[in-house]
Image: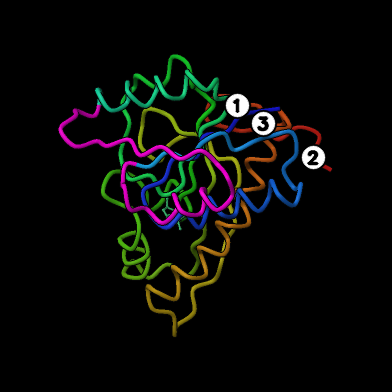
């Protein structure tokens, strides 16, 4: 049984997608051990409570990024976490997380990386940038987290067309639907040990 920690800062709709995937047994042999938020009022904490999942509010106020990362690692270590899922977690952690959790941290990004990613491109800003660039497609990316923000090995991507009538909010809505589909799939592949990281490429083993 793999133990998952989900880190959130807000609504937690991706957390909900992962919860639902474990409840429906789409993801088997895994348990969401805890949900950790740096925001006390994150709605995702309520989603976790409603599903009898342990919640932790880890306040970042007054702490450096390094201190926060170390505090977080202590909580993860205490619980023997196998997989960390970032799901709208708005803090950038420091390298202190990697000695132990290298290739064990996943993230979902609301665009087709490596485009429209990196520091400062998060949330609505991503969809605004996509809209203004005039690209005709966008999508979502589930990827491993590495030291370089939004540049880790890509696990899954799905694409949508951008229509002439789409505004940034329309794009955001359509992309979120994709996120909810591909993030649980990526978690499932991880839990089933089907992901093999080879440099910046992820090979998916025995996919049926
Ligand atoms: C999602 O768009 C995700 O791609 C990004 O943050 C947002 C989180 O949304 N990393 P939610 O909290 O899961 O609803």
Q: Secondary structure at mark 3?
A: strand
For image coordinates 32% across by 20% down, the residue present is 70
Q: Secondary structure at mark 2?
A: loop
Q: CA distance from mark 1 to mark 2?
A: 15 Å
Residue marked by disc 1: 197
Q: Is residue 27 left or right of residue 49?
A: right
Q: Earlier in the sequence, mark 1 or mark 2?
A: 1
Residue 119: image tag? none
Q: Residues within 10 Å of mark 1 (few under 14, many from 20)?
A: some
- Tell me where residue 93 sits by quadrant: top left
For the residues labelled 1 and 2, say whether their Cβ atoms are less than 8 Å apart: no
For the residues labelled 3 and 1, say whether their Cβ atoms are less than 8 Å apart: yes
For image coordinates 68% across by 50% down, the residue present is 21
State the quadrant of the C terminus: top right
Boundaries of the magenta span: 38-65
For image coordinates 48% across by 42% down, the residue present is 107
Name the image colouring: rainbow
Camera-nearest residue between 87 and 153: 87
Q: Position of residue 4 (x, y in %)?
A: 57, 33
Camera-nearest residue between 38 and 166: 38
Residue 195: image tag? 3
Q: Is residue 141 left or right of residue 149?
A: right
Q: Secondary structure at mark 1?
A: strand
Ligand 1 in which quarter = bottom left
Q: Is residue 154 above or below residue 175?
A: above
Residue marked by disc 2: 207
Camera-nearest residue between 115 and 69: 69
Q: Earlier in the sequence, mark 3 or mark 2?
A: 3
Q: CA distance from mark 3 to mark 2?
A: 10 Å
């Amino acid at each position: 049984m793999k133990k998952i920690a989900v880190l959130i800062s807000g609504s937690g709709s991706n957390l909900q997608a992962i919860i639902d995937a474990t409840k429906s047994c789409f993801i088997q042999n895994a348990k969401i051990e805890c949900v950790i938020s740096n925001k006390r009022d994150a709605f995702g904490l309520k989603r976790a409570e409603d599903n009898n999942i342990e919640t932790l509010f880890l306040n970042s106020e007054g702490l450096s990024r390094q201190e926060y990362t170390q505090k977080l690692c202590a909580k993860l270590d205490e619980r023997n976490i196998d997989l960390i899922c970032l799901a709208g977690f708005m803090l950038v952690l420091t390298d202190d997380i990697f000695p132990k959790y290298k290739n064990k941290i996943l993230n979902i990004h609301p665009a087709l990386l490596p485009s429209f990613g990196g520091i400062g491109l998060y949330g609505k800003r991503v969809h605004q940038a996509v809209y203004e660039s005039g690209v005709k497609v966008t999508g979502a990316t589930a990827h491993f987290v590495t030291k370089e923000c939004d540049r880790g090995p890509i696990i899954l991507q799905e694409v949508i067309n951008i229509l002439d009538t789409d505004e940034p909010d329309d794009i955001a809505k359509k992309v979120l639907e994709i996120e909810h589909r591909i993030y649980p799939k990526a978690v499932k592949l991880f839990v089933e040990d089907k992901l093999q990281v080879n440099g910046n490429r992820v090979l998916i083993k025995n996919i049926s």
